[in-house]
Image (cartoon, helix red, strand yellow):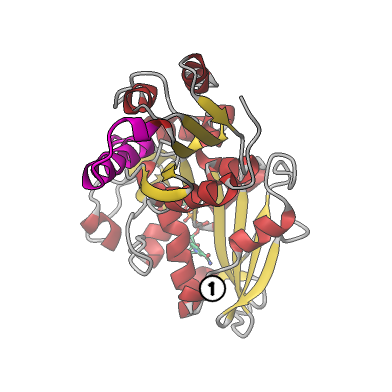
Amino acid sequence: MRPPLPLDLPFIHRCLELAEGPAAAVSPNPLVGAVITLNNQMVAEGYHQACGSAHAEVNALEEWKAYLQIHQLDGEAAKAATLYISLEPCNHQGRTPPCTDAILASGIGTVVFACTDPHPLVQGRGLQRLLEANLEIRGPVLEKEARWMNRRFETTVHHQRPYIVLKWARTADGYLDQGEQGPGPKISGSLAQKWVHGLRRQQAALLVGARTVLVDDPILDARLAGPPHPRIAVAGDSRPLPMDLQVLRKVPQPLWLPWPSAPYSLAGWHEILLEAGLNSLLVEGGLKTLELFLNEGCWDEIHVLENPTLRFGKGTPAPPEPENPLVQLQLGTDRYRVYLHPGWVPGQNAPDLNYLREHFIPQTSLT
Ligand SMILES: NC(=O)c1ccc[n+]([C@@H]2O[C@H](COP(=O)([O-])OP(=O)(O)OC[C@H]3O[C@@H](n4cnc5c(N)ncnc54)[C@H](OP(=O)(O)O)[C@@H]3O)[C@@H](O)[C@H]2O)c1
């Protein structure tokens, strides 16, 4: 195994960019992107588009074969080519054949990787097989960034639970709703709502409590950001909900997470979600549902949107926020704060602070 070269960086960067496109459509698989270069020119690229479909390197190799044909190059050219990949290739038969087979069959001489695959079936075996076949292997490159991109996948492998994102909207005087009087007017502005839809398409599942479904009658999709839409999960007991609610008209059988009974534990929910192939969860309330996660410290990110001009005077108080937001900015008419669980340590098991802050700053395309 060799250390990376400076010229490897932009190509691995491109792999990460490609990988992120399909968002939660790949769940429970990792996000993966691949690029093939010849004489340091990018000639083919590919990414894993959805769970069950071809892996990134196989898609890039398809483009590479077309390139060889168009330019009437033979297999000899492959020796001089380099495959860049954001995650170590797999070496086992899963829903698709081992990617190492496809790489070896292509004759490509060099492979550069961003990070190894923590999955128990891979863990270095993919790279080992390529090394034994005398390919030149360089890496890791942008390892922390690549692992962070796959934090949902990594969390399922290391902690046997989905990656958990909590989100709530609060008024200037700290309320989630108007209590007895009902939810009250919408708290967040239009830009914040669009941003929340972007957050939704990143997570495999979206959870709300049964009372929120009843009281707010929400639609719960990512329509303002575009697909993939998260799978809808509802936390509640066995009382049936009226079928004319908007969510149930669209999804008559949402994933039902049985309301925990004493002594409650979220472990059962984690099992249900992972069995359904859902590696990340966005929890959007209400308070009772959020508290289940907050009381156990079981979360990875918290996103809070505060309307600085709306006051309810009374209602359900928003949960207390942790100290030191990672990001704190104005998002349209709302104040936006993001917190990262202290278990994620910038520069250690996460990228450095600047990278993380940039990652959470809404893109200008939102405005
Ligand atoms: N500002 C925000 O970000 C935000 C986001 C979402 C919701 N909200 C507001 O939060 C309020 C609801 O929150 P919440 O904490 O009361 O509840 P919730 O977390 O939405 O749902 C959990 C509660 O639902 C009830 N429940 C359980 N199973 C049920 C079933 N099968 N049928 C009907 N009810 C069932 C249970 O309460 P019981 O056992 O007491 O019935 C349980 O405590 C609404 O006013 C909503 O507008 C605000």
Foreground residue among 198 and 82: 82
What predominant SS class does the magenta segment belong to?
Answer: helix
Residue 321 in which image quadrant:
bottom right
Q: Residue at x 55, y 28 (%)?
A: 137
Disc 1 CB within 8 Å of nearest ligand 1 atom: yes
Residue 57 painted magenta: yes
Foreground residue among 38 and 224: 38
Q: Is residue 17 visible?
A: yes
In the rendered image, residue 180, in percent from the top left (x then y), is placed at 51, 69
In the rendered image, residue 108, in percent from the top left (x then y), is placed at 40, 30
Foreground residue among 52 and 77: 77
| 300 on left or right of 111 | right
Q: Is residue 208 visible?
A: no
Instruction: Identify whether 112 is placed above or below 71.
Output: above
Q: Residue at x 29, y 58 (%)?
A: 247
Which stretch did the figure color magenta? 51-78
Q: Residue at x 64, y 61 (%)?
A: 338
Instruction: Identify whether 66 is placed above or below 119.
Output: below
Secondary structure state at the residue bearing disc 1:
loop
In the rendered image, residue 365, in percent from the top left (x then y), is placed at 46, 74
Mark 1 residue type:
Gln
Q: Residue at x 73, y 55 (%)?
A: 353
> In the rendered image, which residue does mark 1 sit on?
178
